[in-house]
Image (spheres, grey):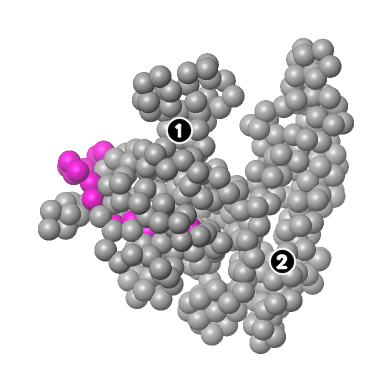
Amino acid sequence: MLNKLLGKFSKDLGIDLGTKNTLVYTADKGIVINEPSVVAVNSRTDEILAVGEEAKRMVGKTPGHIQAIKPLVDGVISDFEVTEKMLKYFIDKVHAESFTLIPRPRVIIGIPLDITEVEKKAVEDAALSAGARQVHLIEESMAAAIGARLPVSDPTATMIVDIGGGTTEIAVISLGGVVTWKSLRQAGNELDNNITQYIREEFNILIGEQVAEKVKVTIGSAAPLKEPMEMEIRGRDLINGLPRAVTINDSQIREAMAKTIDQIVENIKITLETTPPELVSDIYEHGIVLSGGGALLRDLDKEIAQATKIPVRVADDPLTCVVRGTGILLGDPELLAKVLSPGTEEL
C-alpha cells in the first residue's frame, strides 16, 4: 500500500544496464542519465566515492585503498552490492529535483538473451533493493528493435544486431518474439582488448583501456578507408619501463580488430542459416539493422552487407536504442505484456 502511494510521486524508469554505460529514460524528459557503469569504492570504509563519469576518470589511477569497479561483465551483474548502489544512485539522481522523499518507481530493464535464471533474479533483486517497487525485464534485442521503431509486432521478420560493450546480440524478431538468436562475448570491449594486444606485440608498448577505446573511436574501421588516418599514442615501454610514443594508422588497427569483426559477421551468417525461409525473405527485403555503440565503427555496415549480400543500415542514434525501447514500453502496457521476458516475477 505504501509502495503504491510512494509510486504515485515517483517517475517510472526505463534502464539500459550496460557493461560500459548505464542509460536511464523517463517518460517526461526522455534520456536523463547516460554515464559509464563504473563505481569508485573506498575499500577501507566501504564508502561510495564516485559513480559514472567521475568514477571512470579514476580507472587505472587509484591508490591501493580505492577501487574503480565495473559491476557488470558481459552484460550481467558480477558484483551485486555495487550494482545495487549504482542503481540507487541513479534512481535518487533522477528524483533529486522532485519532492519525492523515498522514490519507488516502476522500472523496465534490458537483459541479454543468454541470461540465466539466477542472473535474471540478480537484476530483479538489485533493482528492488535499489528502491524499485516493480521490475519488468525485457530482452535487449527486443528493446533495441522497439527503440529503432521496427515493426516487432507484425508477422514480418526484423533482424537486429546489437553490438554493446560486453556482448553482441543477433536476433530475428517476428510477432513480438525472438525467433532465432545468437549471443556472443565478442563486442566493444573485445575490440579494445585486440588493440591493446596488437600494440603490445608489435611495438612492445603497454596502453590502458581508455587509450585503446580512443584509438578505436578515432581511427578504427571495419573496411579500408578512402583516406588513410593515423594518430599518436603514448604508453609504457615494456623493455625499459619508460614512457614512449608511437604513431599508428587505420590499417594496423583494422588488422588488430579483424578476428573479432570476422566472428561477428560469421555469426550473423549462422543466424541467417537457422532462420525459417519465409523470414529470411523478409530480412532480404527490409535489411539488417545495427544498434549499440559498436554499430558506430566506421564501415561495419558495409562489411556486413558485403558478407551477407543483404542491405544493412545503422539505427538512428544506435547508442540509445535499448533505453529508448524501454521508454516506449513505459507508455505502452499492451506491447509490454507481449514482449515481457518470461519467468520474471509479476509484483
User: Tag 2, which secondary structure?
Assistant: helix
Q: CA distance from mark 1 to mark 2?
A: 34 Å
Quadrant of res 81? top left
Marks 1,2: beta carbons within 8 A: no
The number of discs equals 2
Looking at the image, residue 31 lies above or below residue 57: below
Where residue 238 appears, as percent x and y from the top left, is 80, 20
Left or right: 263 as drawn, with respect to 181: right
For label 2, the residue is 268
Q: Which residue is mark 1?
A: 39
Magenta residues (range): 96-111
| Residue closest to the eye, 335 or 231 | 335
Q: Position of residue 114 (x, y in %)?
A: 56, 62
- Determine which quarter of the picture holds residue 317: bottom right
Viewer can see residue 289 = no
Question: Going 71% across and 39% down the picture, which residue do you hit?
Answer: 193
